[in-house]
Amino acid sequence: MQRIAAFALCVSLAACSGGSRALPPVASGVNSTTKALSTAHFTIAVPPKSAQAKARNPKYVSVNTQSVVIALQSVNGKPFTGTQAETAVNLTSSSPDCSGTPLTCSISVPAAAGNDAFAVSTYDAQQTSASPATPAGNLLSSGTVMVNVVAGQANAPSTPLVLDGVAVSFIATFPSDPHISAISSGGNPGFAIVGNAPYTLTITPQDASGASIIGPGAPAYNVTSPSAEVTVTAAGNNTFAVQVKSYSANPINLQVAPQNSSIFTLATPLPIQEIEELWVANYENYANAITAYALASAPYQMTSDSINANGQNIYHAMAVAFDPSGNLWVGYFGSQNILAYSLAGGPTPIASDTIDNGTVPLPGPPTGLAFDAGGDLWAATDNGYVTAYNVPPQVSPPAQIQAYTLAVPPNTATPGVQSMLTSIAFNPSSTLVGQTFWLGNAYNPNVIEYSIPLTGIKNTIAETTSTADNYGLAVDAHGNLWIANQNNMSVSEYSQSNTSAPQLAIQTPTGGPTGLAFDGNGNLWVACSAGGINSVGEVAEFATAGGTVNTSSAVAATITDGINTPYGLAIAP
């Protein structure tokens, strides 16, 4: 009875259905008359089915191999075309020369005295024809081995038999992680990745029988990205670090192809889709000081990304911002410090990047954070200061930029009332010089624009009511400024060309707005603190229509899980 998992090779031509084969004639000037009067001996260990996911030695023999063809190619460097040049052997479990586990088979093939080169090829079907031009089945592996043949001796290869797997497809895998899920795009299987942390992609080639090609005989692959939105870095043999750098509405097709192959030559698309991640600073929640949410069709909480402030001497998270490297910076109002977190492998504090009353001073409780076009961090504090910091990768640890320190004048409309800055937002610009930013103020109804370098006030937006307290600011992709007014429970939009009056105002349905952020689709997310401090609140999404938030104020989605007095919002770049 035949066992497909066994690899049994005949010791004589008479015992095999393949029989002896001759190569076709070759060009004149080569040795075409020498007869194969000697023999060469090969030993091949065939892995059982249970070895499918393990490395193999000697190099690659598929678990689905059913036959082998061994051909004498050359003698002393000259092509061999004499008789008995090729031997085809079917695999049978009854072969007297195969035994053990794994099944180890010894075969003898015709050889000629001299330095012989043999081509060894394995197939996934039994051979039924003696013709060397029409082997049965699919080619699974192949290789060349040298044997120094001496007449009358047992001639074995001087080195282990080397077979390389022939790939016709591959399997792409990521580690099991809540940030990664399977998708299909254009009929091609791919992956959706939440957030912008790097993850390890493994490419496992497969032969024509569907067996994974593993171990030293596996072909090497290249994986490339056509877009800067997804970066791919080689991390080892057929392993790659994949990182989504910025959001794209459509999947990015990575191209996967073996480095060298005569069969599988076309690059195969591997779709990668980023699902944006919204990060929320919860002022009154220490166990979930920062919560993260995947912005899928139905937003859901990424519990693995929560930052627990309990026992860490950090209190009242109020501001969040991402640096160009994808690290998350959090301003804690209660403990008056700013901490940086690496998101690779989960939110982990970067100890050297703390800004507080120590070596990197912070003039007051942080209320707003934002990064400028040069990658510097700007912090607004509730006692009326704006301070800029060089942060990694420019400087480590962070260092204050004295020239970019600003003390906002007190509220002139109400003498004796200081300026309590609440938020900061930069207008889009590709260069630092000439870029402008806006400052929100809880005790002053005005939102003030400054330019870089700091040369004084450039522009002022006077809110229409004296009770306005501007707790959140955001600039959309069109350069329009959006202002969250907590007392008036409204969000106002001002265009670049007209800051004298809002071009749009929406009412928040559940509470006073305290934080704003735009996602990659242009949708506006609003943190609503409901009744103020010690309230639960929610984060609401307002859909866009033609680049403008829907004037009907219809809420497209709401997030309540893990929310407690939300203030700052940030979306992973």
Image (spheres, rainbow, N blue to C red):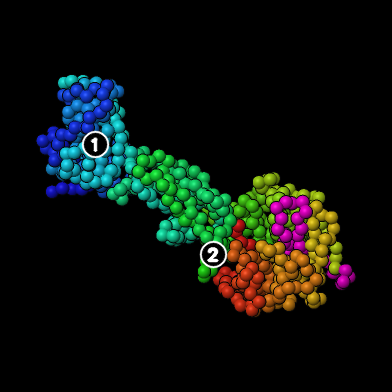
Residue 487 visible, this angle: yes
- Residue 104 lies left or right of residue 203; in this view the side is left
Q: What x and y, as percent, mark residue 344?
A: 55, 52
Of the numbered discs 1 and 2, the one sitting upstream in the chain is: 1
Report how far apart the C-alphas of labels 1 and 2 lie in the structure.
52 Å
Residue 17 numbered tag: none
Q: Nearer the viewer, residue 121 or 234?
A: 121
Magenta segment's dominant SS is loop
User: Which residue matches tag 1?
Assistant: 44
> Mark 2 Cα within 10 Å, few/some/many (few <14, many 20+)?
many
Q: What x and y, as percent, mark residue 254?
A: 48, 51
Q: Which residues are magenta?
A: 412-440
Tell me which residue sits at (20%, 48%) in the image. Answer: 4
Tell me which residue sits at (10%, 35%) in the image. Answer: 14
User: Which residue matches tag 2?
Assistant: 294
The amino acid type of the residue labelled 2 equals Ala
> Mark 1 Cα within 10 Å, few/some/many (few <14, many 20+)?
many
